Image (spheres, coloured by chain):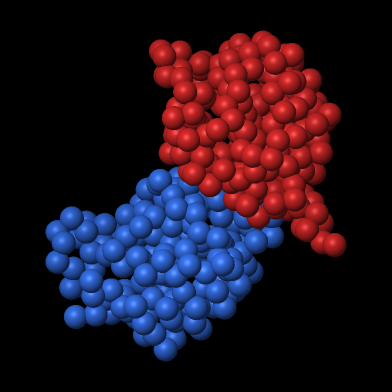
């Protein structure tokens, strides 16, 4: 499966959620599907998207929060899977696209290609709902279930190590940041 | 354990008075009482971390959602958080309040704390992070509020160093 196909399939649901992506291909592909003020692209700080998702989820209990993560980033902050499982915010979905590669820096292989099992790590960290979704149909179903479930959901999808032809995004990162926080402040107001 | 319960209470009350409702923390001897107070307080959310840098992400998410938070950690936790501080909090202009126990400074008996103690202030200076040392319990509430105010207006990290004088009794 291409990550882009999965994102396209779930975009109608995603656009109503608070979404954090990591840098690189995931950010560009979501942006190209249609930017929303509730989408935040974390362009650096690898590994911290899931921690951001936790901070957002516990601060916005009425919103659904989704983190679109990658194997390279998750491997940099594996402890975060354990923290997520410990606090299990009921409104958080952590979706890891595993292409077994650090694609945006030239495709160097990551440890998931050598056997590291992120879904297995998440389960053993204590996460109750871990889904594998390697086809578009499975991805759509897993994300629908995660969106409707009252409980932390982790989805791991093996995807092809293919990204967009260009990694440029026509949005300044601070514009994205303030647009996102203004939007969230609007959600909090009565 | 001669960690000051009284001054831990002063610090915890100051954090609450500054409007902070979320603390992310990693246990450290000087912080045990403050963490227990946070755990016992129904109005405070405490997130116990596996590694301090996670707290930068958590506070970033909380801030973007309009909630005031702080990180509670040892100065070695500051060392391990540097990339998050630079590449998330500073890059994205996040008012990250860091309350840091200042180990390895004057009076330190544990040899393993001393290297971190030696470079804590130079590190904060090189990161351009404005900081104050808290030693007098009478000024703690004022200084915590001042730090939160500066973080909010500058949209940058600000640090408070908890000294031995404040936290330790013997």
Can you name the residue that lies furthest to the bottom here? B138
Residue B33 is left or right of residue A3, and the answer is left
Give the residue at x 69% y 23%: A142
- Total of numbered circles in the picture? 0
Chain letter corresponding to the colour blue: B
In the rendered image, which quarter contains the N terminus of chain B?
bottom left
Give the residue at x 80% y 31%: A13
Chain letter corresponding to the colour red: A
Residue B12, image x, y percentages: 46, 74
Judging depth in this view, the residue of B136 and A51 nearest the camera is: A51
Where, by quadrant of the figure, is residue A157 drawn?
top right
Where, by quadrant of the figure, is residue B83 drawn?
top left
Residue A23, image x, y percentages: 61, 32
Judging depth in this view, the residue of B34 and A6 nearest the camera is: B34
Residue A168, image x, y percentages: 69, 28
In the rendered image, which quarter contains the C terminus of chain B?
bottom left
Q: Can you say whether A70 is above or below B30 in the image?
A: above
Give the residue at x 64% y 39%: A151
Q: Is residue A161 visible?
A: yes
Residue B18, image x, y percentages: 57, 75
Q: Can you say whether A111 is above or below A68 in the image?
A: above
């Amino acid at each position: 499966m291409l990550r882009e196909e999965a994102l396209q399939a779930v975009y109608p649901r995603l656009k109503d959620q608070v979404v954090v992506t990591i840098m690189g291909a995931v950010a560009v592909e979501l942006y190209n599907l249609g930017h929303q003020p509730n989408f935040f692209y974390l362009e650096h700080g690898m590994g911290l998207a899931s921690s951001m998702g936790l901070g957002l989820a516990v601060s916005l209990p009425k919103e659904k929060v989704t983190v679109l993560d990658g194997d390279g980033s998750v491997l940099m902050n594996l402890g975060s899977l354990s923290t997520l499982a410990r606090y299990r915010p009921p409104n958080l979905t952590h979706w890891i696209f595993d292409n077994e590669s650090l694609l945006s820096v030239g495709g160097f292989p990551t440890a998931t290609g050598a056997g590291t099992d992120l879904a297995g790590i998440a389960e053993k960290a204590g996460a109750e709902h871990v889904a594998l979704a390697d086809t578009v149909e499975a991805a759509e179903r897993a994300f629908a279930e995660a969106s409707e479930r009252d409980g932390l959901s982790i989805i791991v999808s093996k995807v092809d190590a293919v990204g967009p032809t260009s990694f440029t995004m026509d949005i300044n990162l601070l514009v994205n940041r303030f647009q996102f926080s203004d939007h969230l402040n609007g959600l909090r107001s009565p | 354990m001669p960690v000051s319960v009284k001054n831990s209470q002063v610090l915890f009350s100051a954090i609450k008075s500054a409007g902070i409702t979320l603390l992310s923390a990693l246990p450290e001897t000087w912080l045990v009482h403050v963490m227990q107070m946070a755990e016992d307080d129904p109005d405070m959310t405490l997130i116990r971390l596996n590694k301090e840098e996670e707290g930068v992400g958590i506070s970033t998410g909380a801030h973007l959602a309009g909630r005031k938070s702080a990180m509670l950690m040892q100065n070695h936790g500051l060392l391990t958080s540097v990339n998050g501080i630079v590449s998330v909090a500073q890059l994205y202009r996040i008012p990250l309040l860091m309350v840091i126990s200042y180990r390895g400074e004057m009076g330190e008996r544990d040899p393993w704390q001393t290297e971190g103690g030696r470079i804590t202030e130079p590190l904060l200076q090189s990161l351009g992070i404005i900081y104050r040392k808290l030693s007098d319990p009478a000024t703690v509430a004022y200084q915590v509020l001042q730090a939160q105010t500066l973080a909010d207006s500058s949209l940058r990290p600000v640090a408070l160093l908890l000294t031995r004088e404040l936290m330790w009794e013997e």
